[in-house]
């Protein structure tokens, strides 16, 4: 049975047209033929207006992440109201994902959550590579939130800027060499599964045909989050299995009250479709 998934990037996709095109093409390859994925970026100006501004501009500041989380929470509600069957929070830091999940009854899956839980099926300990150094504290906190400290061998900053990993016709050899060097360092620290950070690097590695480093699998996280959404939608439809609504983190608040508070705090304009 066909399904519709809202894919939410942390990037303002209109500013990176080549990446936007490659992301959409890759998504079409990894989901089922009858799955429609509607790709959304963030609102214009989310990460500033200067050349080079992007998610890395704000990711090192807790308050900025809290502010950005409103946009994603309201996107989840827009997805549900617009008939989407599931929501893919397609960014590794997953700002406000618990709050976002509490607002809707459709499955909401985080990019980091999906990658890490999939890694548990493929090995004993995963290692995470990041090309945004300021994200380390956030990912450490997310791993603690998921209770996976003992399954993480380490988090390592790879040492090249995000612009260097945006997919091109051919992956730069220097980037691939740096990736292999850092992946092998994590393997030496005990990792037997590698999670290559944010989507641009994951897509670049996939495009270069890299699915393993030596005898260790490399998670393709864009596929991981979308395939997990597909599975949860299937389970809800076929078996009636869906998330808990009990307790502080799971209870679904009244939608009208959510919108009243959005008006109070001046963020109600976010209840409009992203790009």
Image (cartoon, rainbow, N blue to C red):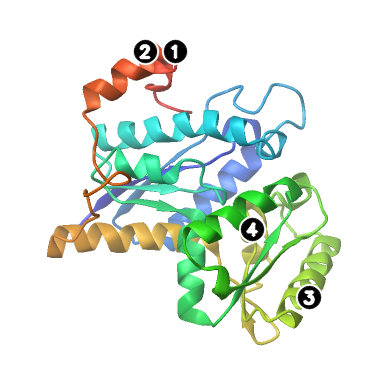
Q: Which residue is mark 2?
A: 263
Q: Which residue is mark 1?
A: 266
Is residue 99 rendered to the left or right of residue 27?
A: left
The quarter in which the N terminus is drawn is bottom left
Spatial CA span between label 3 and label 4: 15 Å
Nearest the eye: 35 or 11: 11
Q: Earlier in the sequence, mark 3 or mark 2?
A: 3
Image: 215 above or below 267: below
Q: Which residue position holds label 3?
A: 185
Give the residue furthest to the front: 248
At numbered mark 2, what does the secondary structure look like: helix, strand or loop? helix
Q: Nearer the viewer, mark 1 or mark 4?
A: 1
Instruction: Find residue 92 and report its horizontal and vertical position in percent.
Output: 56, 52
Mark number displayed over residue 239? none
Q: Secondary structure at mark 1?
A: loop
- Sequence-wise, the earlier of marks 1 and 4 is 4
Q: Nearer the viewer, residue 105 or 221?
A: 105
In the rendered image, residue 112, in percent from the top left (x then y), is placed at: 52, 57
In percent of width and height, residue 149 lies at 56, 68
Taking depth in this image into account, of 210 and 178 the one nearest to the observer is 178
**Residue located at (41% from left, 49% from top):** 88
Sort mark 1 into few (<14), some (14-19) or many (20+) by Cα contacts within 10 Å.
few
Q: State if disc 4 and disc 2 touch (CB < 8 Å).
A: no
Contact flag, marks 2 and 1 (Cβ < 8 Å):
yes
Image: 250 above or below 224: above
């Amino acid at each position: 049975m066909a399904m519709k998934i809202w894919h939410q990037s942390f990037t303002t996709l209109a500013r990176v047209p080549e990446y936007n095109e490659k992301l959409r093409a890759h998504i079409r390859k990894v989901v089922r033929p009858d799955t429609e994925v509607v790709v959304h970026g963030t609102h214009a100006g989310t990460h500033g207006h200067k050349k080079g501004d992007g998610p890395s501009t704000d990711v090192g500041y807790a308050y900025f992440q809290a502010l950005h989380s409103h946009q994603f929470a309201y996107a989840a509600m827009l997805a549900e109201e617009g008939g989407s069957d599931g929501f893919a929070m397609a960014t590794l830091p997953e700002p406000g994902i618990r709050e976002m999940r509490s607002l809707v009854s459709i499955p909401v899956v985080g990019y980091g959550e999906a990658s890490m839980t999939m890694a548990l099926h493929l090995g004993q300990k995963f290692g995470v590579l990041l090309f945004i150094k300021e994200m380390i504290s956030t990912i450490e906190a997310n791993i603690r939130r998921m209770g996976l400290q003992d399954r993480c061998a380490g988090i390592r900053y790879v040492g090249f800027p995000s612009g260097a990993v945006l997919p091109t016709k051919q992956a730069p050899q220097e980037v691939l060499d740096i990736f292999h060097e850092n992946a092998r360092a994590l393997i030496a620290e005990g990792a037997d599964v590698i999670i290559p950070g944010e989507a641009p690097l994951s897509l670049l590695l996939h495009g270069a045909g890299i699915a393993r480093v030596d005898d260790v699998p490399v998670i393709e996280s864009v596929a991981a989050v979308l395939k997990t959404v597909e599975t949860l939608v299937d389970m809800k439809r076929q078996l009636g299995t869906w998330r808990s609504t009990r307790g502080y983190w799971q209870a679904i608040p009244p939608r009208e009250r959510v919108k009243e508070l959005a008006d109070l705090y001046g963020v109600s304009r976010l209840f409009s479709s992203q790009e």
